[in-house]
Image (tube, helix red, strand yellow):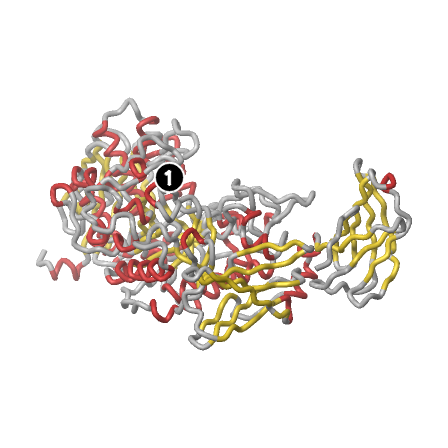
């Protein structure tokens, strides 16, 4: 290994540009000539095209007329007798670098058989690469060199059965050796210290046949954190806070209330969105109950988190138990959405990406500094070809190996449109019914606005859904201004905006809208982020009684479930979940984050009310149109109503379900209102201020009395339904 004491520094910043920085402490920074020595010993003079005074050093921009072989060693000499190595600089962020080193193969990481294991790593800027194999049982290790192949890929095949062996890669870039876990590792040791060679065929769990899903708007999403869901002392679950706890059936809590997986099945949701379960930082897997974390600190993208496993020291346990949990949900007809965090890593400098190809995987600003649009210290540069490939490969892996049914992309607006198009193409080629949704916030990352996968560009990604913050803020009130009230909290000023939210914020009747179709709108008023709905009302509506606030929460939940788009519920929303006023509970203890099953046992009637709304939505497709054209044709807002009322008429919808007409009324004040009905015929009330479901509660004619803060749903039966029911 060549040892270089760098008096000055030289960087390859473009395929034809070498930047040299000479400190003024060295000959006042003044150098007349630079010579480059190629790997074969040939020397030639560099042409200085530009010189710039940088206060403490002089910057020389030199042009070259030959191709530098990246991955080979070059030396730069000055006319004072000093020399340095040519380091890989900003060239890695050029289109030319991407084109030269893009690797199309689908075999990065390890390929295991009992006879031999092949290791492949993409490290184009490395001059040497080794794989370090560890035998922890015997306290032995060995280092095996990899051979450089085409496109910057390094490879070696090691004979023998390596199952269970830990491994890392040793990579030399710019004369510095760094040790990194394989970015494509499918299994890791405790706390993700090493990759582990495993035989995934031993972990296969057959997938159940799922009910058909003809449109994304058929979905009803329920957001769950694996630990929160069962960790409560009264959950009745044996494997509390673990993958296997999510898989337990027949569990019950206080007053014999149904809990866990059986409760999800009973509630009627179609999808469970699981907060991140790829390997993350923030919880010590050796003592998992000591700390808490939501999981948005990604370490290893293709290996499951160990703190949810019964034995985090066993690399197979987390894989097998996660698959069992996913299959248990699917066996109940519930699809599983994976919360995927591809927009950033936990700590850039410590990530495998940065250790293996320094500077490539992350965005940098105009001054060469790492950007921070995500707010957590780094932004993944998804627009670069091998970064995009990694994301697409990872999504494909979870879809095929674990059989998930969709993905929720955290801070999706940081990612680029082309990457999301490739993700969508791969996912829907394998599973046309898979849901793709994400956070489309426009964050200050150095990517042109027209390339960001934000809500402003929703028309460029018609098959991907977005969290509808307009729905959230107009129905509930601003998430960030806790005192602001939305329509459901009594603020009539948001009435018009709430009406548009009911229509899915789509573009109809030449009105401006964010989305092409309702399949792009994820409607919600509460999620793991920010205050729960109940905690917000404890501040914004503190002058009201708990009983009135409960009515408001039921009203807001009815907005979510009955509006056009994809309804999204935060776990526990249906029984007034609280986090004791904690706004950002990402690392708060279980006492704050756990789902309180005692609370659920106290509000069984309200839970049944939400379950009834879910039944309503599932029964009739008029609540879940797939196109804006259907909304424009059938949904009519009722204009002549008091300011406290939003009413809409779903007309001539017999082709979509058992009722020919549906009238939905949302009321945000306690005063009783009498509203005229659209005609003189008989209307059947299936939802009022006390109950909801698909069976008529009573019938009315000419007018309806709306009692207090509530949602009413009235239906007219088709002639066929009347005959079937002998009406």
Residue 112 quadrant = bottom left
Residue found farthest to the left: 726
- On the question of residue 475 being in view, the answer is yes
143 over 252 or under it: above or below: below
Q: Position of residue 45 (x, y in %)?
A: 88, 58
Residue 65 quadrant = bottom right
Could you tell me which residue is drawn at 49 percent across and 44 percent down?
441
**In the shown orientation, is residue 84 left or right of residue 572?**
right
**In the shown orientation, is residue 104 left or right of residue 710?**
right
Q: Position of residue 69 (x, y in %)?
A: 74, 65
- On the question of residue 681 being in view, the answer is no
Could you tell me which residue is drawn at 46 percent across and 46 percent down?
297
Please tell me which residue lies in front, 522 or 650.
Answer: 522
Q: Dot 1, crowdedness within 10 Å: few (<14), some or many (≥20)?
A: many
Q: Position of residue 310 (x, y in %)?
A: 30, 54
Could you tell me which residue is drawn at 84 percent across and 50 percent down?
82
């Amino acid at each position: 290994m060549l040892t270089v004491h760098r008096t000055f520094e030289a960087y390859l910043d473009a395929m034809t540009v070498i930047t040299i920085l000479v400190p003024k402490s060295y000959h006042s920074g003044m150098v007349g000539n630079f010579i480059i020595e190629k790997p074969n010993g040939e020397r030639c003079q560099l042409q200085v095209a530009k010189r710039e005074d940088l206060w403490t050093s002089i910057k020389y921009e030199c042009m070259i007329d030959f191709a530098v072989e990246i991955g080979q060693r070059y030396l730069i000499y000055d006319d004072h007798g000093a020399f340095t190595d040519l380091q890989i600089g900003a060239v890695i962020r050029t289109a030319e670098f991407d084109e030269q080193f893009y690797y199309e193969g689908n075999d990065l990481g390890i390929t295991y058989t009992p006879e031999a294991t092949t290791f492949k790593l993409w490290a184009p800027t490395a001059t040497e690469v080794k794989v370090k194999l560890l035998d922890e049982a015997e306290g032995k290790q060995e280092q095996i060199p990899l051979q450089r192949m085409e496109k910057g890929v390094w490879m070696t095949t090691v004979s023998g059965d390596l199952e269970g062996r830990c491994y890392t890669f040793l990579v030399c870039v710019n004369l510095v050796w760094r040790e990194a876990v394989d970015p494509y590792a499918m299994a890791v040791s405790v706390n993700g210290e090493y990759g582990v060679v495993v035989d995934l065929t031993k972990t296969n769990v057959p997938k159940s046949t799922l009910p058909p899903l003809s449109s994304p708007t058929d979905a009803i999403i329920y957001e769950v954190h694996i630990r929160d869901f069962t960790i409560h002392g009264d959950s009745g679950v044996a494997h509390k806070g673990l993958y296997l706890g999510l898989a337990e059936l027949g569990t019950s809590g206080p007053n014999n209330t149904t809990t866990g997986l059986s409760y999800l099945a009973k509630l009627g949701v179609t999808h469970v969105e699981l907060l991140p379960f790829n390997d993350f930082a923030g919880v010590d897997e050796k003592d998992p109950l000591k700390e808490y974390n939501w999981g948005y600190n990604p370490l290893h993208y293709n290996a499951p988190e160990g703190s949810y496993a019964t034995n985090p020291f066993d690399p197979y346990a987390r894989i097998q138990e996660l698959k069992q949990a996913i299959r248990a949900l699917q066996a109940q007809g519930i699809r599983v959405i994976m919360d995927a965090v591809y927009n950033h890593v936990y700590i850039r400098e410590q990530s495998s990406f940065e250790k293996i190809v320094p500077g490539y995987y992350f965005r940098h600003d105009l001054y060469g500094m790492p950007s921070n649009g995500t707010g957590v210290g780094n932004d993944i540069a998804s627009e670069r070809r091998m970064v995009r490939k990694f994301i697409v490969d990872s999504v494909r892996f979870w879809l095929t190996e674990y059989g998930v049914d969709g993905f929720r992309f955290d801070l999706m607006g940081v990612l680029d449109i082309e990457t999301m198009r490739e993700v969508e193409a791969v996912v829907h080629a394998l599973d046309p019914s898979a849901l793709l949704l994400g956070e489309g916030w426009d964050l200050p990352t150095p990517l042109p606005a027209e390339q960001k996968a934000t809500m402003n560009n929703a028309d460029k990604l018609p098959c991907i859904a977005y969290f509808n913050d307009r729905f959230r803020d107009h129905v509930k009130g601003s998430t960030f201004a806790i005192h602001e009230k939305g329509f459901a909290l009594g603020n009539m000023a948001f009435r018009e905006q709430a009406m548009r939210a009911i229509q899915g914020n789509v573009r109809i009747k030449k009105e401006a809208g964010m989305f092409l179709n309702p399949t792009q709108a994820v409607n919600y008023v509460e999620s793991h982020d920010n205050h729960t709905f109940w905690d917000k009302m404890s501040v914004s509506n503190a002058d009201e009684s708990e009983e009135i606030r409960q009515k408001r929460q039921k009203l807001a939940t009815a907005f979510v479930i009955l509006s056009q788009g994809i309804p999204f519920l935060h776990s526990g929303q249906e029984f007034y979940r609280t986090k004791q006023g904690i706004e950002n509970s990402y690392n708060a203890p279980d006492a704050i984050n756990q789902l309180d099953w005692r609370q659920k046992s106290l509000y069984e009637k309200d839970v049944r009310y939400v379950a009834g709304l879910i039944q309503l939505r599932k029964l009739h497709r008029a609540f879940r149109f797939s196109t804006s054209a259907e909304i424009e044709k059938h949904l009519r807002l009722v204009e002549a109503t008091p300011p406290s009322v939003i009413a809409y008429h779903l007309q001539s919808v017999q082709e979509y379900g058992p009722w020919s007409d549906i009238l939905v009324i949302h009321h945000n004040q306690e005063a009783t209102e009498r509203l005229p009905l659209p005609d003189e015929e008989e209307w059947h009330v299936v939802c009022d201020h006390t109950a909801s479901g698909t069976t008529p509660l009573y019938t009315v004619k000419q007018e309806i009395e709306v009692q207090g803060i509530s949602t009413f749903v009235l239906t007219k039966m088709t002639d066929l339904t009347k005959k079937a029911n002998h009406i």
